[in-house]
Image: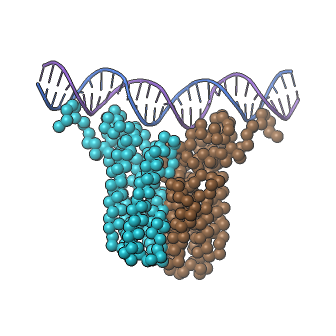
Chain colours: A brown, B cyan, C purple, D blue
Amino acid sequence: MAIGRPRAFDADRALDRALDVFWRKGYEGATICDLTEAMGINPPSLYAAFGNKEGLFRKALDRYWRLRTSLLDEALAQPTARRVAERLLHGWAKFLSDPCHPKGCLTVHGALVSGEEADCIRGELEKRRATSQAGIRERLKRAKREGDLSADADPPALARFLATVMEGMAVQAASGASRKELDRVAATALRAFDA
Amino acid sequence: MAIGRPRAFDADRALDRALDVFWRKGYEGATICDLTEAMGINPPSLYAAFGNKEGLFRKALDRYWRLRTSLLDEALAQPTARRVAERLLHGWAKFLSDPCHPKGCLTVHGALVSGEEADCIRGELEKRRATSQAGIRERLKRAKREGDLSADADPPALARFLATVMEGMAVQAASGASRKELDRVAATALRAFDA
DNA sequence: GGGGTTATATAGCAAGCGCTACAGATAAGG
DNA sequence: CCTTATCTGTAGCGCTTGCTATATAACCCC
């Protein structure tokens, strides 16, 4: 055990609470007061454990990203491009409307608008979304090489399309769209694969 | 001419400047200082002319909405559902990447995240996006009645799909997507109509 | 020119922001 | 026990926010 007075809260649990607040309010919308209240601690404990607001956000983002990445990986592991797209969009619909956590997508919420001080956060989120899109693109390239995607298909364009639909679905979810409505959007988008 | 000292600035021009700031920074990201600087006036002039920050935003939003509505109306006036969707998405791609104004869509930017005080703004923007979607839906219903949309088509689902793609495109545009990339997304989305 | 009315510029308010100094509390090592 | 090290709670710092009190300037009507 480390020397000194031990911390009186569970850092992982506190991080989950912080993620919930950021998820609902965005990076700038979440105040230190909101966060400490949700985490059940006082400001000095927060700063001692996580550095500052940006550090806390980055650690919470890592937790969020694990959720999102597992979703993505599961989809990319499907055997065909069509199955990948299906799993991606319908899994996303389920995720966005899951009652266990706030509606919408943290990276989309936080990435759009900000005062100047949050520019680096916006950059970070943009980077992560680009990474996701690149993962889909590479998977579709492979599908084309393997022949389960037609020879005249355009993997980068398809990947961007899927990423765009997912981002749009996040906006819809944040505006109150239901699971059923999101699934219908997903099904409609998938028709672009059948054409 | 009204009695009293005349105002020394053009309210319409000032409103355009304010719109530009809100468009780039969002409702909360735009400070009174940003706004007054861009508008070339001092705070008391702003408050005398527009009430408060929220009032200024609503008036700027009305200007923005005129741009967006004219785009929508032009698309909805096309003779067939397919042509409507084409015009909608490609017009939107052009709009989002127009170098004459900031990238992205004001209603999407402002609508996602906020501190509590901006809740009513978020509600207003949600309402406007819902209105747009409803306009598309009604046009597609008409197309179905008129027979240029197949009998098994689902106008509400198609309208939601189009709105979702448009919102996703706004996110992409805000993240730096080019006109060409957005047009390719639009083209891919349109394949859902051909299926 | 004087009175009334409205805009302007300066300057600063109260409130909320992210963050921290400080003192007290709780542990380990001696 | 005392010392050292770390965490906790209170209280408040400096700064920015949206907004405004006040005094002055510019216009119309008489």
Q: Quadrant of the N terminus of chain A?
A: top right
Q: Position of residue B139 (x, y in %)?
A: 38, 67
Residue B56 visible (yes or no): yes
* Near-viewer residue (A44 or D19): D19
Q: Position of residue B55 (x, y in %)?
A: 37, 41
**Tally of numbered discs:** 0
- Location of residue B138 with respect to D13 vertically, above or below: below
Q: Position of residue B175 (x, y in %)?
A: 48, 57
Q: Residue at x 54, y 80 (%)?
A: A150
- Location of residue A12 with respect to A68 vertically, above or below: above
* Near-viewer residue (B129 or A131): B129
Q: Position of residue A22 (x, y in %)?
A: 59, 47
Q: Residue at x 19, y 32 (%)?
A: B3
Q: Residue at x 56, y 78 (%)?
A: A149
Instruction: From the viewer's perspective, tell me whether residue C24 is left or right of residue A164.
Output: right
* Near-viewer residue (A122 or D9): D9
Q: Residue at x 66, y 41 (%)?
A: A39
Residue B105 visible (yes or no): no
Query: Residue B51 appears in which quarter of the rendering?
Result: top left
Query: Residue A21 appears in which quarter of the rendering?
Result: top right
What is the residue that sits farthest to the front in this orientation?
Answer: B145
- Location of residue D1 with respect to A190 vertically, above or below: above
